[in-house]
Image (cartoon, grey):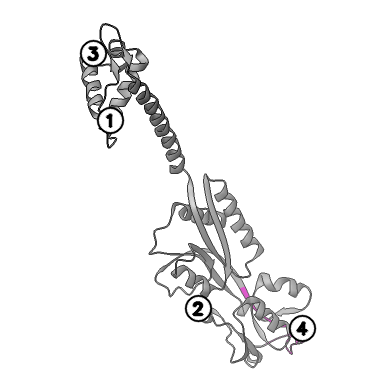
Amino acid sequence: MLSQVRDLDLQLLRLFVSVVESGGFSAAQGELGIGQSTISTQMAKLETRLGFRLCERGKAGFRLTPKGEQVLLATRKLFGAIETFKGEAQGMADKLLGSLSIGLSEALDAQVLARVGAAIGAFRRRNQAVQIELLSAMPAELERRLLQDQLHLAIGYFSGAQAALDHQLLFEEQQALYCGAGHPLFDQPTVSREQLQRQDGVHHPYRFIQPDQPWQAAASSARSEQVEGTLAFVLSGAHIGYLPRHIAAPWEARGQLRALLPQALGFSVRFHLASHRGRQPSEAQRAFAEDLREAFG
């Protein structure tokens, strides 16, 4: 009785199909490249494994038994299923599957978003069927989600203090110090560092930006984690604060913001592609990271 199908059984079944399609043992010799006695021995092994006769052979010629007819149908169905499996398995070998959760820092420049879009487009042109989720959050939140395996990749400006995260530089964002219309310094022809030290600045609670800022507020009654909050404080005319140049540009063009000593006090923030170095990346994650690096050059 055949309780398990082994490789040898598949070989014997293939021989059986060849014998049937050739019309008998003698005719199958040329097709199989083995002698009639060997074919007879192999067929006997198969019948022993199955527990019943598959064919009648003798002076009357070669003829399948009723059970042999059923085995032939089942065998052809089996080999068809194997071929289907091989095709599907090969397709899966070349296809990216699964899901990706990607975190993006807030208030990214339009050109940066365009490059992220280009990376997504390049990824979609691959042989893939991947569900992609995009999440916008503050850098500290992105770091937390990466560490808790809630994100596969994240683009942002990070502390660098998390040893568990791997960082690859993507681009730099320019920051400048601004005041808004109505602020005492807005209409002054020249502004000195001494004057700036007396101003009420917007505090950003990002410990990893502070060392890079050429200007530090001596006093601050305004605090914001988001760029939009900082912008609102600066537009009030009561505070000065750092803003990304691309965020401030339209307001500056309308005469509502002024950059303060931009050459001396401007600085750049490095944005990285971060991932958890302790987690084995999926094929989809590696491919998407490659497309991102390509898009950002």
CB of mark 3 within 8 Å of CB of mark 2? no
Label 3, on which residue?
36
Sequence-first tag of 3 and 2: 3
| Horizontal side of residue 68 vs 210, given as left or right | left
Image coordinates of residue 26 in percent, x first then y, are 28, 10
| Horizontal side of residue 229 vs 83, given as left or right | right
Sequence-first tag of 4 and 2: 4
CB of mark 4 within 8 Å of CB of mark 2? no
> Predominant secondary structure in magenta?
loop
Label 1: few (<14), some or many (≥20) within 10 Å? Answer: some
Image coordinates of residue 285 in percent, x first then y, are 47, 56
Label 1, on which residue?
9
Task: Indicate the secondary structure of the residue bearing disc 2.
Answer: loop
Q: Which three-letter amino acid code belongs to the residue tagged 2?
A: Phe
Over which residues does the magenta segment extend? 175-191
Label 4, on which residue?
181
Q: Nearer the viewer, residue 89 or 209?
A: 89
Image coordinates of residue 259 in percent, x first then y, are 69, 79
Q: Which three-letter amino acid code belongs to the residue tagged 1?
A: Asp
